[in-house]
Image (cartoon, rainbow, N blue to C red):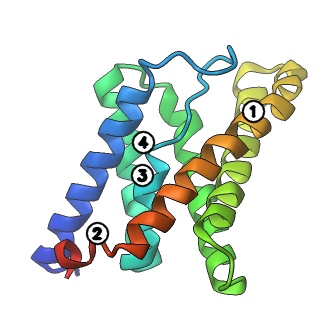
């Protein structure tokens, strides 16, 4: 059972991640790919991997997907974001465990790579068309660039210990 402090922090992280994900949908993507976002809400998940148990980070990823879907009214987006987010958190946590010297840029790029691959695979399954595999190289390129920026931001946040006082 989680104590009140952890529940409050999980709620805070989930709300921030969900709101960022929701507001990202208003930005025109760099490349016109349906549903493409820059993934800035994953900054929250990367930071959460530093401060919380992995199970808690999975919970935040699930809550982020649900909240973003509720806010946008696009309930089918859960089909894409939920499995992708869970696999991305798994990939990032494995990368952090087995490659401890990897910067957050590397961890972020790994998370984005897995997120994008799962999302394209889900598109192929849900929409019953292999044509979505043609998007994969573009999604990986844009995702790698955006996740590099996300990782850089997390590197800076951790260097300055910006969240340390809040999360104690």
Q: Residue sitting at 69 percent across and 26 percent down?
A: 126
Q: Which residue is mark 2?
A: 162
Q: Residue sitting at 80 percent across and 29 percent down?
A: 138
Q: Examine the rendered structure and indicate whether residue 121 appears above or below residue 102.
A: above
Q: Earlier in the sequence, mark 2 or mark 4?
A: 4
**Cβ–Cβ below 8 Å for labels 3 and 4?**
yes
Closer mark to the observer between disc 1 and disc 2: 2
Q: Residue sitting at 18 percent across and 72 percent down?
A: 166
Q: Secondary structure at mark 2?
A: loop
Q: CA distance from mark 1 to mark 2?
A: 31 Å
Q: CA distance from mark 1 to mark 3?
A: 22 Å
Q: Secondary structure at mark 3?
A: helix
x, y percent for residue 139: 75, 33
Closer mark to the observer between disc 1 and disc 3: 1
Relative to 46, is 125 on the left or the right? right
- The tag on residue 139 is 1
Which of the 4 image quadrants contains residue 107?
A: bottom right
Q: Earlier in the sequence, mark 2 or mark 3?
A: 3
């Amino acid at each position: 059972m989680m104590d009140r402090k952890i529940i409050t922090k999980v709620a805070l992280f989930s709300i921030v991640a969900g709101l960022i994900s929701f507001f990202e949908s208003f930005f025109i993507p760099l490349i016109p790919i349906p549903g493409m976002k820059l993934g800035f809400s994953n900054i929250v998940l990367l930071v959460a991997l530093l401060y919380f148990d992995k199970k808690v980070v999975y919970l935040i990823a699930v809550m982020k997907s649900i909240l973003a879907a509720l806010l946008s009214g696009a309930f089918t987006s859960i089909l894409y974001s939920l499995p992708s987010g869970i696999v991305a958190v798994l990939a990032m946590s494995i990368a952090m465990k087995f490659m401890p010297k990897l910067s957050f840029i590397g961890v972020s790029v790994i998370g984005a790579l897995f997120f994008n691959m799962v999302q394209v695979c889900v598109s192929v399954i849900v929409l019953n068309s292999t044509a979505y595999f043609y998007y994969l190289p573009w999604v990986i390129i844009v995702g790698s660039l955006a996740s590099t920026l996300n990782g850089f931001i997390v590197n800076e946040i951790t260097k300055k210990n910006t969240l340390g006082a809040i999360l104690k």
